[in-house]
Image (cartoon, helix red, strand yellow):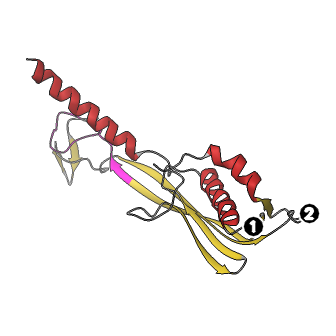
């Protein structure tokens, strides 16, 4: 008797945990190893790098841009420099739409559930078809990717340049705000 009750409960808990694991924002970590989400960087010149951060559909634009700035600061410090300036910076938004049937609407295989038991179609009444079609739930799914080309330098950051950042300050301020990859 206890196993009959325990199995459905365990199955429901496992399904809930699996779904909740899928619906988390992209953690701060390198892209690759089976995932295209995270940061990547490439040296372009002696003091110039291209840095990017891609988020999944649950990651906000703000988190993606913070991930980009944090990686730019880390690249700056790893290359032995003190500050960086963004030369080109862009955030791309990828939008797609997902449509799924409304689970509470008329089911063509069950004529007893729906807004009405019978529908008029092509001159006769039919219990199987809705003349207006099925009801759909449409959801917009956004995904952001930020890229920047940065120039790195030593000494104090250039005064008066709004695109220049002190790398240590960026790591100190943004590092604790982003969840890390395990």
Question: How many badges with numbers are in the image?
Answer: 2
Q: Which quarter of the picture shows residue 97? A: bottom left
75 drawn magenta: no
Quadrant containing the N terminus in the rendered view: top left
Label 1 crowding class (10 Å Cα cut-off): few <14, some 14-19, many 20+? some
**Label 1 vs label 2, nearer the camera:** 1
Q: Calculate the distance from the C-alpha at mark 1 to the C-alpha at mark 2.
A: 17 Å
Tell me which numbered mark, 1 or 2, is placed earlier along the sequence.
1
Q: Is residue 2 shown left or right of residue 78?
A: left
Residue 95 at least partly seen: yes
Q: Secondary structure at mark 2?
A: loop
- Residue 64: x, y in percent? 60, 56
Question: Given the current orientation, which residue lies at the most extreme left position?
Answer: 1
Residue at screen point 25% across, 40% down? 106
Q: Which mark is residue 159?
A: 2
- Residue 31: x, y in percent? 48, 63
Q: 103 or 41: nearer the eye? A: 41
Q: Which quarter of the picture shows residue 89? A: bottom right
Residue 104 at least partly seen: no
| 96 in relation to 121, above or below | below
Q: Which mark is residue 81?
A: 1
Magenta extent: 99-113
Question: Given the current orientation, which residue lies at the most extreme bottom position?
Answer: 45
């Amino acid at each position: 008797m206890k196993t009959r009750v325990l199995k459905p409960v365990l199955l429901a808990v496992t399904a809930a945990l699996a779904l909740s694991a899928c619906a988390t924002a992209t953690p701060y970590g390198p892209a690759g190893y089976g995932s295209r989400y995270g940061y990547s960087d490439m040296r372009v010149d002696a003091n110039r790098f291209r840095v990017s951060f891609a988020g999944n559909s649950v990651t906000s634009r703000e988190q993606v841009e913070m991930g980009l700035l944090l990686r730019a600061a880390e690249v700056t410090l790893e290359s032995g420099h003190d500050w960086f300036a963004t030369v080109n910076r862009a955030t791309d938004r990828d939008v797609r739409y997902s449509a799924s049937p409304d689970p509470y609407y008329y089911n063509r295989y069950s004529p007893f559930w729906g807004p009405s038991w019978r529908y008029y179609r092509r001159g006769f009444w039919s219990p199987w078809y809705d003349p207006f079609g099925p009801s759909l739930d449409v959801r917009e799914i956004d995904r952001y990717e930020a890229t920047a080309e940065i120039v790195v330098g030593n000494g104090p950051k250039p005064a008066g340049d709004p695109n220049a950042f002190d790398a240590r300050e960026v790591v100190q301020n943004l590092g604790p705000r982003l969840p890390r990859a395990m």
